[in-house]
Image: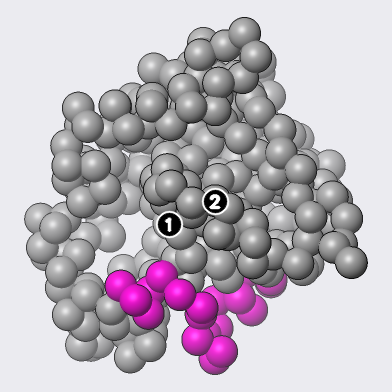
Amino acid sequence: MQLSDLQQIHTNYDHIYLSPHIDDVALSCGGTIALQRKRNERVLVVTLCTAAPSPEISFSALAEEFHSQWKLSPDQVVSARLHEDRLAMEQLDVDYHWVHFVDAIYRYPDAYHSRDTLFNQPATDDPLGLHIAELITTLSDHTPPATLYAPLGVGSHVDHLLTHATVAYQSGSNVTFYEDFPYVAVPGALEQRLATLNTRMTSTMITIDPVIETKLAAINTYVSQMDELFGGSDTMRQTVTQYARSLCPDGATYGERFWKKSFMAT
């Protein structure tokens, strides 16, 4: 069910997932979400960057490149992707809320105008972190018992880094970080990200064998992203299952891995 207002969020949720963009949560931890729903646990997915770009902005060459890859015009891009997200959330059988923050390529085109700037340290005057902090406060007030999930920041997309940093700074111990897929499938990317953190992290593996097909079906709804991310649906299936198999939990075939802060490094 879609929640149109944060006031509809209540204390009955067991898990709340923060997704910087449309598709991040399904890609990264859709199996664990499906497993939690299979156990009748209450799950809410909160997707941050879902606002349409202002018609008055000038799109950067990078934004135009993305539009071309997605085969969507600027006035179609967000509505089409929200439709895909709605289908994915239905596949995962979760409640969901779209916050309507603006994606980095539309929010700050002067700063995030190339892949090198988009996948790098955020601009110091980027307002997204403050908006996320206010959101976390609201969520904490409404759902204090829930476990909060946020991206680990693998791949260094600025929106993922801002989400991670804000959650890590503002939230308590009831926080878990998921691996950003498909960035985490790049050899060395996870190790590089962990090396940048000033906090020691411990990992937990979740077996998703019973729900791997549900995860794949949810990802498959993001038709506009399929070519850019994977080169097609068949390659997506191969890439997702191959990485899930590489985690190989004991006695299982497919897994997802999560991270928690352990203690501050000395």
Label 2, residues with CA under 10 Å away: few <14, some 14-19, many ≥20:
some
Is residue 160 toward the left or the right of residue 49 in the image? right
The disc placed on residue 129 is none
The residue identified by callout 1 is 21
Q: Position of residue 196 (x, y in %)?
A: 64, 67
Is residue 46 toward the left or the right of residue 26 in the image? right
Q: Position of residue 67 (x, y in %)?
A: 16, 64
The magenta region covers: 115-134
User: Count of labels shown?
Assistant: 2
Q: Amino acid at mark 1?
A: His
**Which SS class for mark 1?**
strand
Up the image or down, 122 lies above or below 34; here it is below
At 68% across and 24% down in the image, what residue appears?
41
Label 1, residues with CA under 10 Å away: few <14, some 14-19, many ≥20:
many
At 55% across and 21% down in the image, what residue appears?
248
Q: Position of residue 233 (x, y in %)?
A: 20, 31
Comparing 8 with 74, the one in front is 74
The residue identified by callout 2 is 190
Q: Amino acid at mark 2?
A: Leu
Q: Position of residue 136 (x, y in %)?
A: 70, 62
At 26% across and 48% down in the image, what residue appears?
229
Name which quarter of the figure residue 45 lies in: top right
Up the image or down, 202 lies above or below 265; here it is above
At 48% across and 51% down in the image, what residue appears?
188
